[in-house]
Image (cartoon, rainbow, N blue to C red):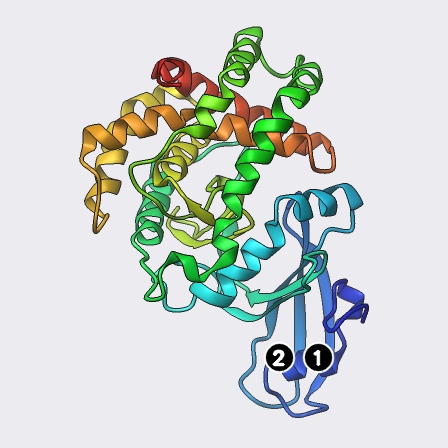
């Protein structure tokens, strides 16, 4: 192993796995692995174990640093590994939020290397960002969001340093996006309309005001609540929220606008259902804002998915599917922002 824990699948020794699962030495007779998922900033694998004895999981999911140096560098800049490890290590257990159980979570001080061993949620399957969501999928995801936003740690939010990376990330984004947007515009000119790309430029011109906005409420937020990061049962019900690499203290309206804005392939479906979806979400909150206050925040944060698409596309490995995904992530919330006249609030 390159550190005190494995960071590549071939480094997972049977003795390490036995230790994690508190199994007797020699009880893991064999182990195999295969890559899974479409993550842009880390690599995930399903491990299959042959145990000689004991009630141990036959499979588990391991998350490791990306093999791609560009994606790994982006993760370090934005503290993505530290935020995900922090969520599973400090908050997830007993939180009431449906997510995989963590068997082991560790990270080095420089945040360059980490490992997560997580519950395998099969037969739940990853949503498809490109295809879009059903109404049931959005409804049940927003119920999970309400549970997340209801969390109030006994120690308070200040106890967890990793929760506060979001402020620094926003400052970095404010400085980097104006320089990076021309690259984004050129790269996606064949996938996005000029109206969408022009809207993006108008937002970039007002980015300082957008970032400086003080939210009426702060909660633990997921930060990337979209279909690729949610596991669903066949009936569309949410099995688990995954990929907590952007988990931080933030505006809960950001999660809700991001989820709704990036999920509906047909904007007419989003227009038809979004107010009812927001009302149902607020009804599930223990200390919710009134509708009008939250709706204003929701309208303002219609840009959240668009901003993530711009920022992420500039800092991770470029792939064909990744570009199509980022284009969908930009186009859907941009149309939402146009429908809701969100630019007038920035």
The answer to whether residue 127 shows anywhere in this view is no
- Check disc 2: other Cα within 10 Å, few if <14, some if 14-19, many if 20+: few
Query: Percent x, y for residue 131?
Result: 52, 32
So how many labels did they put on this image? 2
Q: Is residue 335 left or right of residue 168?
A: left
Residue 344 versus residue 320: which sits nearer the camera?
A: 344
Query: Percent x, y for residue 141?
Result: 37, 45
Mark 1 in CB contact with mark 2 (< 8 angstroms): yes
- Check disc 1: other Cα within 10 Å, few if <14, some if 14-19, many if 20+: some
Residue 314: quarter of image: top right
Kindly identify the residue that appears in the image at 77 percent across and 70 percent down: 3
Query: Percent x, y for residue 45?
Result: 68, 59
Residue at numbered disc 1: 16
Residue 198: quarter of image: top right
Q: Secondary structure at mark 2?
A: helix
Above/below status of 194 relative to 115: above
Give the CA distance from mark 1 to mark 2: 6 Å
Quadrant of the image containing the C terminus? top left
Quadrant of the image containing the N terminus? bottom right
Residue 210 versus residue 234: which sits nearer the camera?
A: 210
Q: Is residue 65 left or right of residue 251?
A: right
Query: Percent x, y for residue 35?
Result: 71, 55
Kindly identify the residue that appears in the image at 59 percent across and 75 percent down: 58
Q: Secondary structure at mark 1?
A: helix
Residue 215 versus residue 241: which sits nearer the camera?
A: 215
Residue at numbered disc 2: 20
Above/below status of 148 relative to 328: below
Q: Which mark is residue 270?
A: none
Above/below status of 75 relative to 4: above
The answer to whether residue 55 shows anywhere in this view is yes
Kindly identify the residue that appears in the image at 71 percent across and 55 percent down: 65
């Amino acid at each position: 192993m390159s550190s005190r824990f494995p960071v590549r699948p071939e480094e997972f020794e049977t003795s390490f796995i036995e230790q994690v699962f508190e199994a007797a030495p020699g009880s893991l007779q064999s182990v195999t692995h295969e890559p899974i998922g479409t993550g842009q900033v880390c690599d995930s694998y399903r491990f299959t174990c042959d145990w000689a004895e004991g009630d141990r999981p036959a499979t588990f999911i391991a998350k490791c640093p990306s093999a791609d140096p560009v994606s790994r560098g982006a993760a370090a800049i934005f503290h993505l590994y530290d935020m995900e490890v922090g969520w599973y290590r400090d908050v997830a257990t007993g939180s009431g939020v449906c997510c995989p159980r963590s068997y082991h979570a560790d990270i080095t001080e420089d945040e360059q290397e980490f490992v997560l061993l997580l519950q395998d949620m099969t037969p739940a399957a990853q949503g498809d960002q490109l295809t879009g969501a059903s109404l049931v999928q959005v409804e049940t995801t927003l119920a999970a969001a309400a549970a997340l936003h209801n969390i109030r740690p006994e120690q308070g939010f200040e106890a967890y340093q990793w929760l506060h990376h979001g402020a620094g990330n926003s400052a970095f984004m404010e400085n980097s996006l104006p320089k990076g947007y021309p690259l984004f515009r050129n790269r996606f000119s064949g996938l996005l309309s000029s109206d969408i790309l022009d809207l993006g430029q108008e937002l970039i011109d007002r980015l300082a005001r957008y970032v400086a906005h003080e939210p009426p409420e702060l909660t633990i937020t997921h930060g990337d609540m979209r279909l690729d990061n949610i596991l669903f049962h066949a009936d569309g019900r949410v099995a688990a929220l995954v990929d907590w690499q952007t988990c931080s203290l933030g505006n809960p309206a950001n999660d809700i606008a991001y989820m709704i804005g990036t999920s509906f392939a047909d904007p007419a479906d989003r227009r038809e259902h979004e107010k009812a979806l927001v009302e149902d979400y607020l009804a599930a909150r223990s200390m919710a804002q009134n509708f009008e206050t939250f709706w204003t925040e929701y309208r303002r944060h219609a840009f959240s998915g668009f901003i993530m698409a711009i920022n992420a596309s500039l800092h991770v490995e470029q792939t064909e599917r990744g570009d199509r995904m980022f284009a969908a992530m930009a186009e859907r919330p941009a149309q939402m922002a146009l429908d809701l006249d969100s630019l007038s609030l920035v």
